[in-house]
C-alpha cells in the first residue's frame, strides 16, 4: 500500500500507541522511511537552530531518527525519551529512557533544544497540553522546541497513519487532531512563543495541494 492510498479516506482499525509501536518497532528504521517523514525531515531541518555543542532532547524518539541527526549535526548531548520500550530497544541512541511525554524525568531549565517528531499526535488534547508544559519547564531560557505533527487537514479528511501488523493486516495508530490554534495556546500556557510555522505539501501527493505536515518552532 503506498502513501497515497494510506492518506485517502480509510478506516483501518486503530490500535493504542504502545500496542501499535510494540509491533511496528521491528520494521521502523531510524531514518525517514516514507514520503510523510521525508517531507517532515526536510522542513524541520529547515527550522533547526545550530545544534553545535547543545543539549538536545529527542522526545517521542522512537528508534532515534532525530537524535541521530542531532548527533551528526554537532549536539554535545542527546537524550532520547519514549514510552515504548520496543521502539527504544530497536533504536540507535545510547542515552535513552522510557518516559511519558507528559512527565519528563529531567531537571527544569536543562536543555537547549527539544525535537519532538511525529509523536504529539498520539496524545489526547489534554496530554498534548501537558507535554508542551513539560517542554516549557525543561527548556533553558532561549531554548527551542521543534514539533511536527500529521497535518490536521489530513486527519480531518479521514487520513490515518498506518502500518502492517504482526498478522499482516494494516492497522492505524491512535491519533488525535491538534490544530495550529491548539498548539499556539498550549505554547502560550507553557511560556513558549511560536516563532515559525510550516505546512509543507508534496508535489506527488494529493496534487501537492493539501499539507502533509504541521511543523512548529517555539522559543522559550
Ligand atoms: C511516529 S513515531 C516517531 C518516532 C520518531 N520521533 C521519529 O520521528 O522517527 C511516534 C513515537 O511517539 C511515541 N509516543 C507516543 N505516545 C507517547 C507518549 N505518551 N510518551 C512518550 N512517547 C510516546 C511512540 O512510542 C513512537 O515511538
Image (spheres, grey):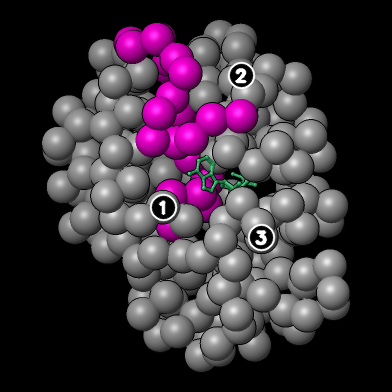
Residue 134 lies in the magenta-colored region: no
The residues colored magenta run 98-121
Residue at image location 44% in from the left, 57% down from the top:
121
Q: Position of residue 119 (x, y in %)?
A: 51, 49
Which image quadrant is residue 107 in? top left
Q: Nearer the viewer, mark 2 or mark 1?
A: 1
In the image, which disc is placed on residue 78? 2
Answer above or below: position of 130 versus 35.
Answer: above
Tell me: residue 176, above or below residue 137: below
In the rendered image, which residue does mark 3 sit on?
Answer: 20
Instruction: Report if the CB atoms under discs 2 and 1 are less than 8 Å apart.
Output: no
Q: Is residue 70 visible?
A: no
Question: Alpha-carbon distance for marks 1 and 3?
Answer: 14 Å
**Taking 63 as reference, is 183 left or right?**
left
Q: Dot 3: within a 10 Å radius of its alpha carbon, few (fewer than 14), some, or many (20 or more) residues? A: many
Q: Position of residue 64 (x, y in %)?
A: 69, 36
For disc 1, the marked residue is 123
Q: Is residue 148 left or right of residue 45?
A: left
Disc 2 C-beta below 8 A from ligand 1: no
Asked where in the image residue 27 lies, by quadrant, the reply is bottom right
Mark before the other along the chain sequence, 2 or 3: 3
- Which tag, 1 or 3, sits closer to the chain's start? 3
Q: Quadrant of the N terminus?
A: bottom right
Amino acid at each position: 500500500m503506498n502513501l497515497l492510498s494510506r492518506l485517502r479516506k480509510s478506516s483501518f482499525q486503530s490500535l493504542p500507541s504502545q500496542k501499535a509501536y510494540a509491533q511496528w518497532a521491528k520494521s521502523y528504521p531510524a531514518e525517514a522511511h516514507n514520503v510523510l517523514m521525508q517531507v517532515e525531515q526536510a522542513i524541520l531541518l529547515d527550522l533547526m537552530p545550530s545544534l553545535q555543542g547543545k543539549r538536545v532532547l529527542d522526545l517521542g524518539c522512537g528508534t532515534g531518527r532525530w537524535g541521530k541527526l542531532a548527533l551528526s549535526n554537532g549536539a554535545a548531548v542527546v537524550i532520547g525519551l519514549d514510552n515504548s520500550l520496543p521502539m527504544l530497544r530497536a533504536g540507535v541512541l545510547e542515552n535513552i529512557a522510557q518516559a511519558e511525554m507528559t512527565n519528563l524525568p529531567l531537571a527544569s531549565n536543562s536543555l537547549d533544544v527539544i525535537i519532538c517528531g511525529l509523536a504529539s499526535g498520539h496524545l489526547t488534547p489534554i496530554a498534548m497540553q501537558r507535554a508542551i508544559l513539560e517542554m516549557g519547564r525543561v527548556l533553558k531560557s532561549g531554548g527551542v522546541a521543534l514539533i511536527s505533527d500529521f497535518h490536521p487537514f489530513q486527519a480531518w479528511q479521514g487520513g490515518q497513519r498506518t502500518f502492517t501488523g504482526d498478522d499482516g493486516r494494516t492497522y492505524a495508530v491512535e491519533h488525535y487532531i491538534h490544530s495550529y490554534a491548539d498548539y499556539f495556546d498550549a505554547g502560550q500556557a507553557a511560556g513558549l512563543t511560536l516563532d515559525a510555522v510550516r505546512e509543507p505539501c508534496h508535489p506527488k501527493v494529493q496534487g501537492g495541494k493539501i499539507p502533509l505536515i504541521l511543523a512548529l518552532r517555539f522559543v522559550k
